[in-house]
Image (cartoon, grey):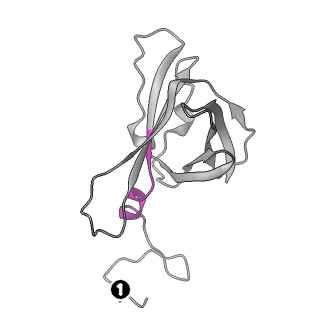
Amino acid sequence: MNIKYYHDFIGADDVVNRFEILQNTSTTPKLIKATNEPFSIEYIEVKKLEPVQGSQATLRLICEKNFQFIDLHTDDMQECMIKFYRADQLYWIGYLDSELYNENLTDSAPYAVEFSGADFNILERLKFRDESENRYTDIAPFIT
């Protein structure tokens, strides 16, 4: 995947943080502006013995012109990936919930827009394929 947008910032603990929005298409990386709280991660409450704990990320970007980020809106849940780094180490990875994008067009630019992403929610919506890239259309054995 190729970096489409990125933003670097210093966290409250003086650690350099960076998030990237990546796409499959060829693109030139573009530095974008973000709000004072550009990135946050929320862990969803789960039962103590539940083996997998999902999380949700929130990105708060500054839109410098109307529809600046409209290219991130897509129906493909795997089109836009988010990577978050702390001190140059990959800390979180997930996919953008592009369907939730909206702008308040009554505000004049620049204004804040919010995106969310999740690490495991995409698994519920993936269409699994066989060796010939055909989608499964019926129940298949686990071994398959």
- Mark 1 residue crowding within 10 angstroms, few (<14) / some (14–19) / many (20+): few
Q: Nearer the viewer, residue 29 or 49?
A: 49
At a point 49% along the width and 76% down the height, the residue shown is 134
At a point 57% along the width and 17% down the height, the residue shown is 65
Q: Which residue is mark 1?
A: 140
Q: Please give left or right for residue 86 compared with residue 124 in the image.
A: right
Q: Please give left or right for residue 68 compared with residue 49 in the image.
A: right
At a point 44% along the width and 73% down the height, the residue shown is 128
Q: Quadrant of the C terminus?
A: bottom left
Query: For residue 137, what is the image quadrant?
Result: bottom left
Amino acid type at circle 1 is Ala
x and y percentages locating residue 88 in the rendered image: 69, 47
x and y percentages locating residue 62 in the rendered image: 54, 22
Q: Is residue 29 above or below residue 137?
A: above
Q: Is residue 69 above or below residue 94?
A: above
At a point 56% along the width and 34% down the height, the residue shown is 13
**Residue span colored magenta:** 116-126
Q: Nearer the viewer, residue 67 or 46?
A: 46
